[in-house]
Amino acid sequence: MATVSIADNPERRRYEASNPDGEVAGFAEYIRTEELVVFTHTEVARAYEGQGVGSALAAGALDHVRSLGLAVIPMCPFIRSYIERHREYADLVYSAKPSSVHD
């Protein structure tokens, strides 16, 4: 398994997984609002595929979102399937509040 560190790069609107030399091994792009983070795309460099980089990236990004008190909309299929396989992150998934609008 590749050793990577996970960091938020807000200027590029993505979380990045970097190897010990600082090379970006993968990233998870997002759109952030005041209340939530929409994950739109995740990519792992070919040289790091199958080494756990994607899972480390997903866990690190989701842990950071949790620490910020934000919810997640997992539009990215990888992040969505990661949450489905790791139910400890299910509570982060945004769900609309019941409407108070009446006819």
Image (cartoon, rainbow, N blue to C red):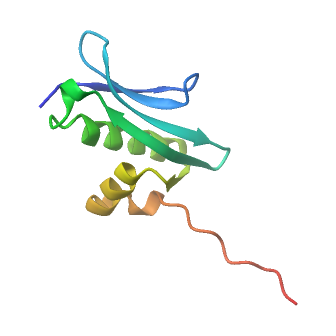
85 over 24 or under it: above or below: below
51 over 62 or under it: above or below: above
Residue at the spot 59% in from the left edge and 41% down from the top edge: 31
> Split into 4 quadrants, where in the image is the C terminus?
bottom right
Residue found farthest to the right: 103
- In-image side of 89 versus 35 (left or right): left
User: Residue 24 is drawn in which quadrant?
Assistant: top left
Residue found farthest to the front: 46
> Split into 4 quadrants, where in the image is the N terminus?
top left
Residue 34 x %, y %: 68, 44
User: Residue 26 is drawn in which quadrant?
Assistant: top left
Q: Nearer the viewer, residue 93 or 68?
A: 93
Residue at the spot 63% in from the left edge and 69% down from the top edge: 96
- In-image side of 63 versus 100 (left or right): left
Residue found farthest to the left: 1
Residue at the spot 61% in from the left edge and 41% down from the top edge: 32
